[in-house]
Amino acid sequence: MKTEVTILRLGHRPSRDKRITTHCGLAARAFGASEMIISGDEDDELVTRLSSLSKKWGGKFKARYEKDWKKALRAFPGKKIHLTMYGEDFRKTASDLRNLGEKKVMLIVGAGKVPPEIYGMCDVNSAVGNQPHSEVAALGLFLYELSGRNPSEFSDAKIQITPSAKRKTVVDTSRPAKMAKKGKPSATKKRTQNAAKTRVKNAKALTKRATAAAKKPRLAKKK
Ligand code: SAM
C-alpha cells in the first residue's frame, strides 16, 4: 500500500529559508511525498519552482501556500506527525504507521522556533535522533524509513539516470533529435533519430538492471 504524504512547512521566511525550504521540497519529493504546504511568509516563486519539478523528474508533486497553518493541519484527513528532536524514536513512529496501513500522513517541520501548540495538535511528535539538526535531514530519514527503506521510483520521468559507480549516464527524453524543417527527414537525420531512440531504450534497460542489482547484497561475505 502506498502512503500519500503531505509536508507542512511552518514559518517560512523567504529571506532566510528560501534554500532550505527548497531542499525540504526536493528531499520530500525524492523520497515519496506528493504535496508540500508552505506556511509563514508568502513565496510564489518557491511554490512555482517546487510544483514544476515533476514535469522533468516525474511523479505528481505539488506545492502550495497556506497562510493559516492551523487550518491546513485541522483539515488534514490522516495522521499528523510533528518532526522534533523532543519526540519518540522515528523508527517506532514509521513502523507504527506502516503496520496500521495509514493511507495519508502529514509530516510537520519548522524553520525557526515552532509554535508551542503544535506539540498537542499532532498525533505524534517524532524525533530523528534527539540532537538538533535540520528539517531536510529529518524529512529524508523519516520518509526513507516510512517507505520501508525502499523509496519508489519515477517511471514517468523525462530524465532517466542510469545508476553507475563510475560515470554519469543521463538520458533526457524531453529533447528528441531535431526534425528537418520541411519534407521527410534525410537518411542521416533518420539514423540520428533512431540512434536516440535506441539510446533511450538501452538506458531504460540498463536502469532496470542496475536497480535490480542494487537490491541484491553486493559484498561477498569474508570467510
Ligand atoms: N530552533 C528551532 C526550535 O527550537 O524549535 C529548531 C529549528 S530546526 C533547524 C528546524 C526543524 O528541523 C525543526 O522544527 C524540526 O522540524 C526539524 N528537526 C531538527 N532536529 C530534529 C530532530 N532531531 N528530529 C526531528 N526533527 C528535527
Image (spheres, rainbow, N blue to C red):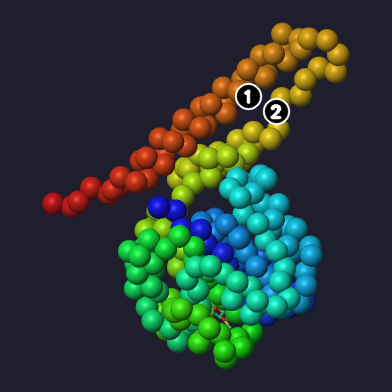
Inspect the image, locate mark 2, and give the three-letter code of the amino acid beneath it.
Pro
Q: Is residue 169 visible?
A: yes
Ligand 1, image quadrant it occupies: bottom right
Above or below — where is 76 with respect to 176? below
Image position of 39 (left or right of 77)? right
Q: Nearer the viewer, residue 218 or 55?
A: 55
| Residue located 37% across and 40% down the image | 212
Inspect the image, locate mark 1, and give the three-letter code of the amino acid beneath it.
Ala
| Residue located 72% across and 8% down the image | 187
Q: Which SS class for mark 1?
A: helix
Give the x, y percent position of residue 62. Answer: 65, 57
Question: What residue does disc 1 label?
Answer: 196
Q: Nearer the viewer, residue 220 or 126?
A: 126
Q: Earlier in the sequence, mark 2 or mark 1?
A: 2
Q: Which SS class for mark 2?
A: loop
Query: Would you say the residues marked 2 and 1 are in contact, meaning their CB atoms lie under 8 Å apart?
Result: yes
Give how far apart the Cα atoms at labels 2 and 1 are.
7 Å
Above or below — where is 206 with respect to 116? above
Question: What residue does disc 2 label?
Answer: 176
Give the x, y percent position of residue 22. Answer: 66, 65
